[in-house]
Image (cartoon, rainbow, N blue to C red):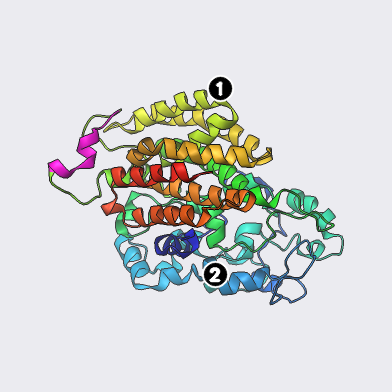
Amino acid sequence: MRIATHPRFALLALCVSLALPHALLAQNENSAANIIGNDKYVGPGSCAATSCHGSVKPVANSRILQNEYSTWIIKDKHSRAYQALTGEVGERMAKILGLGKAETAPKCLACHALAPPAEMRGRPFEVTDGVTCENCHGPAQGWLGQHTAKDSPEKHAQSVRDFQMVDTRNVIVRTDKCLECHLGIPSKFVDHEMIAAGHPDLYFELDSFSVVMPRHWNSPRLHADGTPADDPNWEGVREWSAGQAVQLRAAMDRVAWRARGERYDKKNVWPEYSELSCIACHHSLTAAKDSWRQEHGYPGRRPGDPAWNASRYVVFRLMAKEVDAAAAQDLDQKLQAVALEMSKLNPDRTAAAASAAAAAPIAHHFAERLAGMTYDRAMVLRMMQSICDNAEEISLADERAAEQATMAMDSLYIAYSKDAKPANAAEVRANINALFQQVENASAYNADTFAAALRRIRPQLQ
């Protein structure tokens, strides 16, 4: 069961979509200084011509597929992100939050549509189109003309440098763009208040979510002559590993700005419970004799105190050790400080912000390292074996960590099996699919059962 067919993952991909920071809210710190007068949004119709990106099928031997618009409008859940606001759940959430109508609330439109104010529109287009090309690639008015020129590959750098095109070819930049909505920035985010109203909790993994999208680009990227820019077998591994590092750095940034009270809505809420492990509190209660939580205890925190959600690190730390043991040890120490502070009943704002800010640069170091390194079969096999060997630690971290492990095993094994072609691939795939089933219902999650299922895969990896 690849993630694209998993109902829970498909629902979140619909409800929490990619977007640029909404101009009615605030531009994030990386793009605000670059806004110039002619950088306006022109809508998805500008990309829809059959000679551009609206071809019905991919164009053979082309650097780009040229059917990107068709893929988006037919298959991509981002094109239906606005519709999530008009349904019963979306309207109920808006009512609870006092937002009026969800489909007109800037807080909702920030991640569910391309909805800049009138002065940022180069031509009329419909907000009901949902999350469109420019949400991810940047406002197109400045670069659209040269983008269509015959020598446009040479114009790409200028478009990025001078006209706000987002360099999605760069896996770090692409992940950051995804995480603006799939994790949050000060101008748009999902907090505990929104989750209580009905919004899905946020989680992310670049490779798996790209499959759900689905990808509308050549993977791996192609050179201008049509030859692969990288080994196609390992592109998913690069997206998984570098994406995990970027997500960790962004998560540390989020802890820091929330602790400092840097939110667009100015609500000075602390501690922010959405940073914590949801199922530490929200789970099906059972008799004490049957509780796997009480059986294992609460190492690192006082019983009854909520636990910090460490899922963005528990699996990634294994890759960090693989590529840079010294930096991984430093990151471990920094993250332990974050976890200890955030798992207190009343964490200190200043201490939480400082510990998270200290961890963020190390995570970024790993992102740069992983984005540019060479991957091979032996490394990927060691990573999968390591995940299985650490099954208990991962499973006890919480259900979100189990999800990250499941997505990691899925991405890594797909890449590995393409290269190694193991004879028992069908059996391993069936066991990975069974992991997805175990994290489908968070309230019913059982750490011991998940750990046992993950350990069973270990001897099958060959």
Give the residue number, with chain letter if any, for mark 2.
79
- What whole-number distance in Å separates the C-alpha atoms at marks 2 and 1? 44 Å
- Name the kind of residue labelled 2 in the image: Ser
Q: Position of residue 258 (x, y in %)?
A: 42, 40
- Name the kind of residue labelled 1 in the image: Ala
Q: Nearer the viewer, residue 57 or 430?
A: 430
| SS for callout 1 | helix
Judge whether residue 167 can be spotted in this image: no
Is 373 a magenta residue? no
Magenta residues, dominant SS class: helix
Magenta residues, start to end: 288-299
Indicate whether 98 appears above or below 175.
Answer: below
The answer to which image quadrant residue 143 occupies is bottom right
How packed mark 2 is, by other alpha carbons closer than 10 Å (few <14, some 14-19, many 20 or more), is: many
Mark 2 or 1, nearer chain start: 2
Q: Nearer the viewer, residue 83 or 259?
A: 83
Q: What residue is rendered at 28% in x and 32% in y? A: 346
Disc number placed over residue 326 in the picture, else none: 1
